[in-house]
Image (spheres, rainbow, N blue to C red):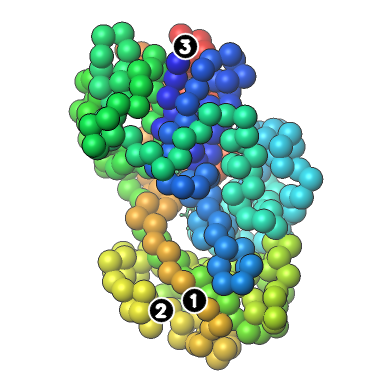
Amino acid sequence: MRIAVIGAGIAGLVAARDLVDAGHEVVVLEKSRGLGGRMAARRAEGDAVVDHGLPVLDVPPGGVLAGYVVDLAADDVLEVEAPGDPVPGRAMPDAPRLAWPQGMTRLPKAMAEGLQVVTDVRVAVVRGDGDMLELGQDQGNTLGAFDWVVVTAPGAQAADLLDTSPRGAVRASDMRAVGYDTAVMVLAGVAMDMPEWFAHRPLTGPIQYITNECAKGRPPEGGVVPVVARLDPDVSERLMEESDRAVLGEALPALAKVLGKAAARPAWAQVKRWRYSTTRDRLDQEAMNPEWTRVLVAGDAVAAGPFMEDVAATGRWAARRIIGA
Ligand SMILES: Cc1cc2nc3c(=O)[nH]c(=O)nc-3n(C[C@H](O)[C@H](O)[C@H](O)COP(=O)(O)OP(=O)(O)OC[C@H]3O[C@@H](n4cnc5c(N)ncnc54)[C@H](O)[C@@H]3O)c2cc1C
């Protein structure tokens, strides 16, 4: 069978790998240039690597994620000493918190090896065409015909696709209603001694948490410590459309209160915005994928819980539905 997986985040990559292992022909279509979705890393000034999406990966032993880490990305993985939960309620109890010196995309990149992944392709339409489903782009060109499609985009983006699919309107409106926090992230290089902590949650002010990216096996260069500050959800919502200057004007003084005055004038600073970061609520995956459909939804909007392991499990669920059909 020919299957398209939309999205190269963790849910899409798990689904794709399971389907390929079961002997199916799979194409992963990803709208951005990179792999991993919200498991995201970038090179900032100099060679500093910063994770500007998911800060660490909680991996419970024996789960879906643990299998991939052990098989594909174990040689350089490190466990981060991170007591507490940077994002309230998002630390999985008793699960090791893992990271990679070269960034959180290390695992998704390894998972994508050997798969057919096409990046820079935004799927806009899922048409029913006889027995097959045809995918198309905004410009009207077709991306091919498939027996099954697995959509792993965040709720509202998945809803836009479902709206175009056969009998997709009801599921689309459910997916559109899934709540997400927006997250404005400030990435900064601060000339200071490396903090002892990995993550710090200020009790007041606009910052939800700060991570010390050096704690992930990335020694400071020239005395500059790269940090990532996630702004509080309400502050993020308010600043989402504002200029980088406005964001930094609010964030840097708050950062300086925690890190010292060097943070008010960092060596470098960047802003990254996530319209959809972490879910506030979720839908039941089984209910969202009725027996009659060949357009399956997976990803965090339909995860059984708030953790990455739950997200990964949605990819496995979608693959099993197809394999068992
Ligand atoms: C700042 C931040 C902090 C977070 N912290 C935590 C945490 O502490 N703990 C936790 O458990 N989770 C956390 N999360 C959430 C976690 O990262 C996500 O739940 C998880 O990565 C979602 O994986 P996914 O595969 O469902 O979706 P994604 O990773 O979003 O993957 C979906 C992919 O689909 C692509 N896509 C979308 N639409 C289209 C289209 N039309 N055509 C082609 N491709 C498309 C996207 O580009 C994306 O790559 C955080 C997220 C952010 C941003």
Residue located farthest toward the right when viewing the structure as drawn: 75
State the SS at label 3: loop
Looking at the rendering, which quadrant does residue 85 occupy? bottom right
Work out whether 63 lies above or below 235.
above
Q: Badge 2, how many Cα within 10 Å: few under 14, some, many 20+?
A: many
Callouts 3 and 1 close, C-beta under 8 Å: no
Asked whether, in this view, residue 229 is left or right of residue 47, the answer is: left
Q: Earlier in the sequence, mark 3 or mark 1?
A: 3
Q: Residue at x 62, y 34 (%)?
A: 113
Pair 2/1: label in front: 1
Q: Which residue is drawn at 38% across and 17% down?
A: 146
Q: Mark 1 points at which residue?
A: 269
Callouts 2 and 1 close, C-beta under 8 Å: yes
Q: Which of marks 2 and 1 is nearer the N terminus?
A: 2
Report, in whole angstroms, how far the alpha carbon at label 2 lies from the one at label 3. Answer: 50 Å
State the SS at label 2: helix
| Residue 270 place in picture, x, y as percent | 46, 72
Q: Badge 3, how many Cα within 10 Å: few under 14, some, many 20+?
A: few
Q: Mark 2 points at which residue?
A: 248
Report, in whole angstroms, how far the alpha carbon at label 2 lies from the one at label 1. Answer: 8 Å
